[in-house]
Image (cartoon, grey):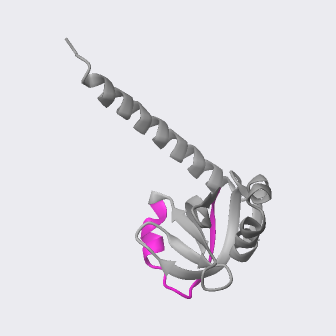
C-alpha cells in the first residue's frame, strides 16, 4: 500500500542522482583540461556581438579563462570583461568554493570551467576550478 505520495519522492530522488552524475561528469571534463584558452573580454564581446555564433563557438566547451575579479558573490565570482557593466560569471565546483572564498576584488585569476552560454545578461562558466591566482 504505497499510495501515490511516494512517487514524487522517488522521482525527485532520481532527478537528484541524475544531476549529481551530470556534475561529476562535468568535473571530469574540466579536470581533463581546456578545449581553448580565452580571456573574459573575448567571451563577453562574442556574446554581446552575436549570441548564436558565440554559443556555437563556446557553449558546452571547457574554457580556461583569465581575468580580473570584479566581485565575489555568495554563489559565484565576476570577472571584469571591459566597462563597468561587462563581466563573465564563474560558478565554482563545490570542491573549489573554499578557494574562491579567499579571492578579492582586483585579483588576477585563471579559471577553467564549462561554458554554459549566456544567462540573463552575462556569459558564465560552471563547474569551475581555480587554476591560478
Say which residue appears at 60% left-offset and 61% top-offset: 125
Instruction: Give percent across and percent down for residue 86.
Output: 64, 78
Total residue callouts: 0
Q: Residue furthest left?
A: 1
Task: Point out residue 56 in the picture as x, y percentages from the top left corner.
Answer: 78, 52
Q: Quadrant of residue 50?
A: bottom right
* Above-or-below relation of 13 to 20: above
Residue depicted at 72% across the width and 69% down the height: 48
Q: Which part of the image, by quadrant, shows the N terminus?
A: top left
Q: Quadrant of residue 49?
A: bottom right
Q: Quadrant of the C terminus?
A: bottom right
Residue at image location 57% in from the left, 62% down from the top: 120
Residue 84 at what x, y percent from top left?
Answer: 60, 85
Q: Is residue 47 magenta?
A: no
Compared with 38, 94 (above or below) is above
Using residue 34 as the reference point, say whether residue 9 is left or right of it.
Answer: left
Q: Is 109 placed above or below 24 here?
A: below
**Residue 98 lies in the magenta-colored region:** yes
Left or right position of 54 against 8 = right
From the viewer's side, name the closer residue of 31 and 15: 15
Is 1 on the left-hand or right-hand side of 87? Answer: left
Q: Position of residue 78 (x, y in %)?
A: 55, 75
Residue reaching furthest to the top = 1
Q: Is residue 25 above or below residue 99?
A: above
Residue shown at the point (69%, 74%) measured from the top left: 40
* Stretch in magenta: 95-115
Amino acid at each position: 500500500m504505497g499510495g501515490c505520495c511516494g512517487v514524487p519522492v522517488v522521482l525527485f530522488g532520481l532527478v537528484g542522482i541524475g544531476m549529481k552524475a551530470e556534475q561529476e561528469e562535468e568535473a571530469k571534463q574540466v579536470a581533463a583540461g581546456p578545449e581553448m584558452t580565452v580571456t573574459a573580454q573575448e567571451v563577453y564581446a562574442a556574446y554581446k556581438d552575436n549570441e548564436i555564433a558565440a554559443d556555437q563557438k563556446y557553449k558546452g566547451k571547457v574554457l580556461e579563462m583569465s581575468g580580473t575579479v570584479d566581485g565575489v558573490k555568495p554563489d559565484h565570482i565576476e570577472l571584469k570583461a571591459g566597462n563597468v557593466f561587462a563581466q563573465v560569471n564563474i560558478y565554482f565546483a563545490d570542491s573549489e568554493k573554499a578557494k574562491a572564498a579567499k579571492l578579492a576584488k582586483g585579483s588576477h585569476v585563471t579559471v577553467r570551467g564549462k561554458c554554459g552560454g549566456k544567462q540573463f545578461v552575462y556569459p558564465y562558466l560552471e563547474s569551475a576550478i581555480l587554476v591560478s591566482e
